Image (cartoon, rainbow, N blue to C red):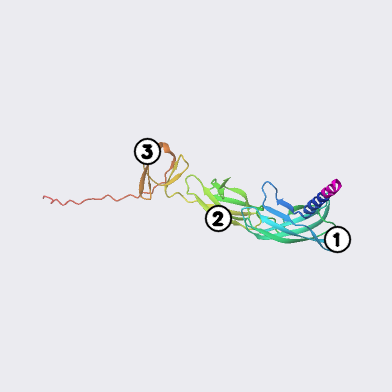
Amino acid sequence: MTRCRFSATLCLLFIATFASAKEKKDADIVLLWPNQANPTLKLSFGRFSQLAAYEGQLSLESNVLIQNMSGKRIPQASFTVYLLDKSDIRIGTGTLTVTDLDAGQQVKVAFQVMSVGIPGTLRLVARDDASGIPTSTKTVPLKIISVPPAASLKVDGRDVGNTPITVRMPIGNHNLSFSKEGYATGSTPVEIKADEVPGGSITFELGGLSRDNVELRDGSVLQGDVISLSMTTVVVRIDGKDTTYDRNQVRKIILVPRETSQQPIAVQQSTTPVQR
């Protein structure tokens, strides 16, 4: 009776071990590109199945689930996939391409490759050629010039320095914001295409201020007309309404030159009869 219980235990243990081995064999190979800390793409390679064999070469296929983990659309991404055996020796090389992948979207593609064996691990290398490197990481240098120069530049809300400056721009749509003391702030959209070549430039002309600028100590900027300024208060007219601010609230005031025209002197004619 004791022997039967022992055999049954061994049988259950064997079944559990076999099931675990099968699950491991069928498990996906998951790769995060370009790294685990900040992935742009997640690629889950399913179990490789053999389609054919010819002169020692195996034709393999794997269904790959690709997920865009970035916050931007990827028009095209192309990878060279290296197949490695358990000794980290390369046994096959293939190409994997995905197109039109929106932010957060997943797509399943069939990956076929020739190999001399079933791979144990995989390695990805982004292709930097006509096939298209993953565009969420590809950047193109763009020289940005402002008139006048030395304007503060922000790209998508991020400070990058003063103009003129060369900025490496990712593929996609961006917003450039310019600011310079004494001039009106301005912005312009710019699109960097996947086939953009280095050497491009963009020039932006800042306009002069049309209103006085009052910068408060909390960082806000008021645009209007400074009506009066004293040791204790500043009165600013904005959209026809006068608002009084404590002088201690104000960090800086930029006054716009006003053009004044000389008015002719009005001469009032006398209606008193002239005595002769």
Which residue is the site of mark 2?
Answer: 189
User: Which is nearer the N-term, disc 2 or disc 3?
Assistant: 2
State the residue in front, 190 or 32. 32
* Circle 2 Cα neighbour tier, 10 Å, few/some/many (<14 / 14–19 / ≥20): few
Which residue is the site of mark 3?
Answer: 233
Q: Where is residue 195 drawn, in percent x and y?
A: 66, 59
Q: Marks 2 and 1, Cα distance to the nearest angstrom? A: 52 Å
Q: Amino acid at mark 3?
A: Thr
Residue ID at (73%, 52%)? 30
- Does the segment drawn in magenta span residue 6? yes
- Res 22 → quadrant: bottom right
In this picture, which residue range is highlighted in magenta?
Answer: 1-10
Q: Amino acid at mark 1?
A: Gln
Q: Amino acid at mark 2?
A: Pro
Q: Marks 2 and 3, Cα distance to the nearest angstrom? A: 39 Å
Which residue is the site of mark 1?
Answer: 57
Asked whether disc 2 touches disc 3, contact meaning CB atoms under 8 Å apart, the reply is no
